[in-house]
C-alpha cells in the first residue's frame, strides 16, 4: 500500500526514500562513489556522477525537499551561496536587470554588487514592504525579483503576496530565500513563488556540521538551474547529503521549539531597561508583525537587538554571555551570537550598511535548543554586568 505522507512531519522522515529500501536498510546508505555504470543515457546531464548532483543520495534529497515545500522539483548544491549564484546566473545574463530587497544577507549583497556588475547584470534595491514603489524601478530588461522571507539581519517580512502578484503581472521570475523561515514556517510554492532557495547549512541540517544549499521550484526551471550547476561544479558530497537528510528528519521539532524560545527571549529583551530595540516579527511592536502573522506559521529562531551604551556595550554583552557561542552562521542546535557587521555583513561598506539600516551595534542571536530559561538568565546577567 502507498504510504500516507500528508503531514510535513511525515514527509520530512519518509519522503524521497528509495522504495523498496536498499537491502532493507531503514536509513539510506551513503553512496561514496564518484561515478556510476553507463546505462545508455543520451544526455550528458543524465549520466550518474557526483558532480552532476544525481547519485542516489542526491536524488532522495531532491524528492524530499520538493515534497516538504509542495513543489515539483529540487536541487542540492555545495553551499547556500552556490544555490543563490547558480540560480541567478541561470536566470540573468549580460544586459539583464534584477529587483532585489534592500536588506539581505551580506554574501548575496556582495554577489549582486561586486560580481554581477562585471557580468553586465544590473541590480536595483527595493523596500520589500512597499509594493507601490516597485514599478518605478522596473525596466524593460528586468527579469526577476528577489526577496527573503525573513530578512537577515533585521528580521523584516516583506509583502510576499504582492511580490508574486507583481512578478506575474510584469512577467518576472519570483525568487525567495527561505532560509530563516524554513518550510515549517513558510512554503513559498503555496504563495506562487517560482523559486525557493536555502542555505542548508542552517536550519535544514541544524547541527552546524556541513555546508549545503538547495533550490526548490518547478520542474523546468530547476532543470535549467541543474544544467548550469553541472557546468559550474558546485556539487554536494554524498556524505554531506546523508547528514542533510538526517538533519531534515528533526526539522519540525527543532524549528517549533526555536520559534517558541525566540519569542520568549524577544519579549524578555523588549522589556529589559538596557535594551533599546528588538527586531523580531513575533513581537507586536515589530513593523511587519501583522503581515508576519498572516503569512507565516511561526516567526523563526533568529532575533536582533541593540543595547544602550553603544559599541562597547554591545561587545561587552557578546563577551559575557556564556551559553551562546560568538560565531557566524545560525540555525543550529547551539545558540550563536554575533554582530553582523563583523561577520555575515562584513563585506559591505559603511554606506551600504547605512542604506540597509544595519548598525555597528546590532547584535544577532540565533536561538538554539538550550533551555529558554537558561538563555534568558544568561542574557540578563550579561546585560546587567557593569
Image (cartoon, rainbow, N blue to C red):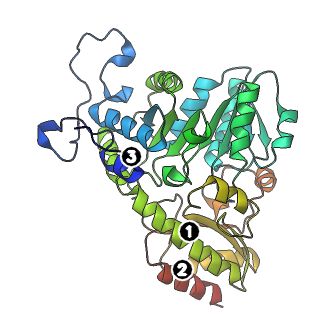
Which of the 4 image quarters holds residue 155?
bottom right
Indicate whether 332 appears above or below 80: below
Horizontally, residue 112 falls left or right of residue 376, namely right
Q: Is the C-beta separation of discs 2 and 1 under 8 Å?
A: yes
* Disc on the earlier residue, 3 or 1: 3
Q: Residue at x 23, y 31 (%)?
A: 33
In the picture, which quadrant includes the N terminus?
top left
**Position in image of residue 45 (x %, y %):** 39, 18
* Sooner in the amino-acid sequence: mark 3 or mark 2: 3
Residue underneath mark 2: 321
Residue at point 12%, 42% (across, down): 24
- The correct choice, above or below, for 4 with respect to 169 in the image is below
Nearer to the camera, 89 or 367: 367
Q: Secondary structure at mark 1?
A: strand
**Pointer 3 residue:** 6
Regarding mark 2 in the picture, which secondary structure is present there? loop
The label on residue 337 is: 1
> Which quadrant of the structure image shows residue 359?
bottom right
Between the residue at mark 3 and the residue at mark 1, the CA separation in whole angstroms equals 36 Å
Taking depth in this image into account, of 205 and 230 the one nearest to the observer is: 205
Callout 3: SS? loop
> From the viewer's perspective, is 24 left or right of 355?
left
Label 3 and label 2: CA atoms lie apart by: 42 Å
Residue 341: x, y in percent? 67, 59
Amino acid at each position: 500500500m502507498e504510504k500516507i505522507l500528508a503531514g510535513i512531519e511525515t514527509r520530512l522522515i519518509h519522503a524521497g526514500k528509495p522504495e523498496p529500501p536498499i537491502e532493507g536498510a531503514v536509513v539510506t546508505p551513503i553512496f561514496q562513489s564518484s561515478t556510476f555504470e553507463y546505462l545508455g543515457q543520451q544526455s550528458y546531464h543524465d549520466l550518474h556522477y557526483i558532480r552532476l548532483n544525481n547519485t542516489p543520495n542526491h536524488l532522495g534529497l531532491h524528492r524530499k525537499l520538493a515534497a516538504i515545500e509542495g513543489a515539483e522539483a529540487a536541487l542540492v548544491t555545495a553551499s547556500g551561496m552556490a544555490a543563490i549564484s547558480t540560480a541567478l546566473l541561470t536566470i540573468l545574463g549580460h544586459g539583464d536587470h534584477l529587483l532585489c530587497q534592500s536588506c539581505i544577507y551580506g554574501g548575496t549583497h556582495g554577489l549582486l554588487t561586486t560580481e554581477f556588475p562585471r557580468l553586465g547584470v544590473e541590480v536595483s534595491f527595493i523596500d520589500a514592504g512597499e509594493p507601490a514603489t516597485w514599478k518605478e524601478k522596473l525596466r524593460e530588461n528586468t527579469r526577476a525579483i528577489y526577496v527573503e522571507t525573513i530578512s537577515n539581519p533585521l528580521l523584516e517580512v516583506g509583502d510576499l503576496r504582492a511580490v508574486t502578484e507583481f512578478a506575474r503581472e510584469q512577467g518576472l521570475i519570483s525568487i525567495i530565500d527561505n532560509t530563516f523561515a524554513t518550510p515549517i514556517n513558510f512554503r513559498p510554492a503555496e504563495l506562487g513563488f517560482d523559486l525557493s532557495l536555502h542555505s542548508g547549512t542552517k536550519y535544514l541540517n541544524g547541527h552546524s556540521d556541513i555546508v549545503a544549499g538547495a533550490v526548490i521550484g518547478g520542474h523546468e526551471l530547476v532543470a535549467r538551474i541543474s544544467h548550469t550547476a553541472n557546468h559550474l561544479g558546485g556539487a554536494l558530497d554524498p556524505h554531506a547529503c546523508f547528514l542533510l537528510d538526517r538533519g531534515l528528519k528533526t526539522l519540525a521539532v527543532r524549528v517549533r521549539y526555536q520559534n517558541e524560545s525566540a519569542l520568549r527571549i524577544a519579549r524578555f529583551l523588549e522589556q529589559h531597561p538596557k535594551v533599546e530595540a528588538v527586531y523580531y516579527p513575533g513581537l507586536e511592536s515589530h513593523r511587519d508583525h501583522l503581515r508576519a502573522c498572516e503569512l507565516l506559521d511561526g516567526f523563526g529562531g533568529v532575533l536582533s537587538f541593540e543595547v544602550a551604551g553603544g559599541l562597547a556595550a554591545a561587545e561587552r554583552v557578546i563577551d559575557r554571555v556564556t551559553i551562546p557561542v560568538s560565531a557566524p552562521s545560525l540555525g543550529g542546535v547551539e545558540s550563536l551570537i554575533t554582530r553582523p557587521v563583523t561577520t555575515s555583513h562584513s563585506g559591505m561598506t559603511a554606506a551600504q550598511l547605512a542604506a540597509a539600516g544595519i548598525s555597528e551595534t546590532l547584535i544577532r542571536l540565533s536561538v538554539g535548543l538550550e533551555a529558554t530559561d537558561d538563555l534568558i538568565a544568561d542574557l540578563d546577567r550579561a546585560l546587567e554586568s557593569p
